[in-house]
Amino acid sequence: MMKKILLGSSLFLFCSPALSAQLEVGPDLQAKVLNGKELEADSGDTVELVDGDNQIIVRYKSILDDGSKTKFFESKPYVFEFKSLGQDLTISVERFRKYKQAEKAFDNGKTRWTIEKPSGVSIPFRFDELPGNPGFLPYADLPKAVAAYNKKNGIYFEGQEIKDINQEVIVAVSDTGEVEITGDPITQLKLWYTKATKEERKTFRKWMIDQE
C-alpha cells in the first residue's frame, strides 16, 4: 500500500511554503532526507515537495544475483537537486539483476538516474555522491552529513529556493595577489558565515551584538 510521508520544519533556513506536488520513490530506492528533514520513504511511497527547488537524498538497496547465490547491495547516498513546478514526479534508477553489475555502475559513477513527469518526460536535475561523516559509521546521521555537504558547497535554503552562494559570489585573485569579491554584501556575508566553524560563528554573533 502506498503511503505518504509528511514533513515538519527543516533544519535549514526554510520558510514553510505551501506543499503541492509529490515525488514517488522508484523501485529499489529509499529516500532518506528531503530539504534537510530526515524521513523513511521506500519504493512506491510518495513524499511531498515544495513548489520550487527541492533537495533529496536517495540510496539504492536491493538483493541481487551473485553467481549461484544472492547478495544484498546498498549504494552510498546521493544528493539530488531539482525544481518542482506543481507536477507529480518519480525518481528512479536503472534496474540491475546482478550484484557485480550494480557494483561496477556505482563505483564508476555511470549509474543512470531519471526524474520524470507522469508523461514520461524527464526533468533536469543535479546530483552528487554524499560524503559521509568522519568515523566508523559515516552515514548513521544523514541530516548531519547533508548539513556538512551544504555548508561546504555554500548551499542554503531561502524561501522556496535553494541558493548556491558559490555561484552568486565570485572571488578573483589578480597576478599581484589582490583579492576582489563581487556580489551583493548580504550574499557575501552569507558565504563567509556558511564557511565558518561553530566557534567562529559564535564569535561573529557576539561581535554583531557589540556593534548595536
Image: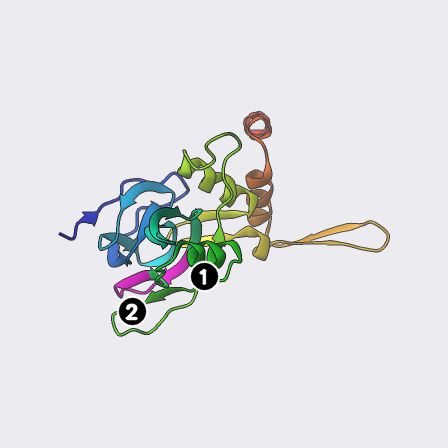
In magenta, the rendered stretch is 81-91
* SS at circle 1: loop
Q: Which residue is rendered at x = 25% and y = 63% of the image?
A: 88
> Which residue position is annotated with label 2?
117
Q: Is residue 210 above or below residue 163?
A: above
| Residue 45: assigned label | none
Q: Residues within 10 Å of mark 2 (few under 14, many from 20)?
A: some
Left or right? Give the position of 189 relative to 150: right
Determine if the magenta segment contains residue 82.
yes
> Which residue position is annotated with label 1?
111
Q: Which residue is rendered at x = 22% and y = 55% of the image?
A: 44
Q: Is residue 143 above or below residue 175?
A: above
Of residues 19 and 29, the one nearer the viewer is 29
Tell me the quarter of the picture where residue 10 sits. top left
Q: Looking at the picture, how far across and down is residue 43, in whole percent?
A: 25, 53
**Which SS does the magenta portion mostly show?**
strand
Q: How far apart are the two marked residues, 2 and 1, measured between alpha carbons?
A: 20 Å
Determine if the magenta segment contains residue 177.
no
